[in-house]
Image: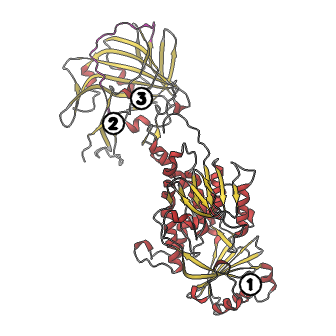
Amino acid sequence: MNGSHVSPQPLKVIIVGAGIGGLTAAIALRRQGHHVALHEAAAAPNEAGAAINIVPNADSVLLKLGVDVLNSGAVPLKSMRILKSSGELLDDRNMLSSADRWQARWLLTHRAHLHEYLKSVAISQSGPGKPASLHYAHRVSEVFPQTATVSFEDGSTAHADIVVGADGVHSVTRKAISPTTNAQRGKHSAFRFLVSRQAALEDPMTADFFTRTGCMDLCYAEDRKIVIYPCANNEMFNFVCIHPAGLSDTSGGYNNSTSSALMLKIFSEFAPVLLAMLEKADPKSLRVYPLFDMDTLPTFVSGRMALIGDAAHPFLPHLAQGGAMAIEDGVSLGVMLSGAQSTDELEARLQLYNNARYERATRMQEYTRIVGGDSVKKDETTTGQLSLNDYLEYGLSHDEFDASNGILQKWRQARDPHVYRRQPIAFGPLPGTRSNQPVESASRTATIVFKTSATYLRNLLPSSAYAFGSRDTVAYASFRLHILDNVASLGGASQYMLGLYIHNIQYTTKSGKAITGTYLPVVFEDLNDPTTSFSGVIGFPRVWSNFSVDASDHTYTATLSWAGQIWAKLNWPDLSAEKDTADHGASDETLLVHRYLPGADRQEDSPPDADDTVMIPLADPRTQTTLHKRDSSDHASVTFNTCDEQRFPVLHRIVSSLAAIPIYEVVEAFVEENVSMPDFTAGVEVESNVIS
């Protein structure tokens, strides 16, 4: 991204399919300001399947979309019983005792009620963003991912910036990615039906067993199981009776009506209290559903199309994560398409969605297969030593909104040439004080060049690799006050720095090459800079200080202090237009900085973590500034006050050493105003002195 700001434009998004995943994606994308059109093949809402678990990892991201599933009549899960088919209790878990481990709730809701609620949020005139449009009886015949074009069976077409394939287990959009990959019936089928709570409580045979509210029952035989849980404000019980597929006639597909007699026969070995509930199933609403599985797709995206939910990864029901994965997909897609600067970014952003979702969704698929006994894999990916809780917690211990935002943030940072990896590294690459500067940003430099003792300054050189370029006992150094005005990362405030620069230093590299430049032993900075940018990137030997700078047309004065102790004052009085400058032998071809970080164990005899020579080429155009004005002073001065050693032992040591530098003569003093800022991170070379 460049420094100029480009306002994100709304994307036109077509979502094929208006199930739970498609509606979640519509809500997420709508909230980002995008224009969403949902195209559903069915002539009217027909969400089936009785009820659904909204596990904590799904609830947490829905809440961030402003969707509270309690509004759909959801029931919080309070307890979970695990029983043998005979009715023998194996485990009775208080699910609320561990609920504080997760960001959100485990809820049980009627699938049709949830679907209706999500639809109302997606198309509502209230709420953030433009309401999504919803079109029924709009069956898709083909999708063209590279152009984001959709053809419908009625001969019409639609074009968008992005197409989302959310058309379920028998997806048409999937064929654009893998034409031969189709969902296949798995090893099991499931009877599904609802029984009213009132009917259970009125029957003496079942009343005691079903008196709890918010309780899920898992009843197991060797090759079949019954899952029971409440929904619809605790008024209904949802039944899922899973059994080997060959035991029931599933030839009619989703709408096949089957007799309760067949179900009772298949589950005849289960406890009488359970059979009594199975007998209450209404034959008119009782359905048997094949459970589908599918080979893993090579990717969930192609061109400007992304698949979500069962279109990308059909789920078996054994870990209650199928709906959650579709919801996570929709949320991730909304995050990845947030703030898109142009359509040129869209394919890259869909790849970010794939990066976020592919591994997690496919691993969750395999864990579900393992728990249900459907896995045929025998390699390390099955992690066969894990318990049911391990598989379950992999799903629960995640927040896709935060995870996707982290991926998007890193991608954005990697594309920004003005950010760098530095402390604090926990927040990724950070901009420096000179990054993304507005056009009107500027800098000022007030310099005092003086003649001094080379012998004294040699004491400040960090190693024998540093030496003066001549054997003279007279040397030249400068105090430079840098003022960076209108710094973007500081909210338009100014930043102050004062450095000691020792000129005509020769650094000899390990290869024997001699580099002549200016050595910077210390720089004082004020408290404005929010990051340790120089310390982290190029190792500026930074010391904090307070600055007070008074400037007029003819005078510059800088006062430096700390905690009320004034320790230095620099003056540039009687400033006048530039005149010829003296030749003091200074060389500014390269700025030399010695970066030193002690070892992490803090032992004196341990090698340092960093002991580097940093070389900054000042001839690089990026480190230079455009001069606007230069004024000189014939009477500049610098004075130091050796601060209280007891109160400021570190500052006292540094300031005392600076105060002891003999100033034989001020040979030049001037103030420059520039219309740009230098970027000292440009072209940095580092030579490490650490012995490994």
Query: Residue tagged by mark 2?
Result: 595
Relative to 412, say whether 117 is above or below: below
Given residues 549 and 69, the one toward you in this image is 69
User: Callout 2: few (<14), some (14-19), or many (20+) C-alpha neighbours within 10 Å?
Assistant: many
Q: Check whether the beta carbons of the residues at disc 2 and disc 1 lie within 8 A of each other.
A: no
Tell me the SS state at disc 1. loop
Relative to 649, say whether 240 is above or below: below
Given residues 260 and 276, the one toward you in this image is 260
362 relative position to 621: left or right: right
Magenta stretch: give its range: 572-594
Please state which amino acid type lies under the numbered disc 2. Arg
Query: Residue tagged by mark 3?
Result: 651
Relative to 352, say whether 359 is above or below: below
Query: Residue tagged by mark 1?
Result: 281
Main SS, magenta region, reads loop
Please state which amino acid type lies under the numbered disc 1. Ala
Q: Earlier in the sequence, mark 2 or mark 3?
A: 2
Q: Is residue 117 magenta?
A: no
CA distance separating discs 2 and 1 = 77 Å
Q: Check whether the beta carbons of the residues at disc 2 and disc 3 lie within 8 A of each other.
A: no
* Among the 4 quarters of the image, the one containing residue 326: bottom right
Q: Nearer the viewer, mark 1 or mark 3?
A: 1
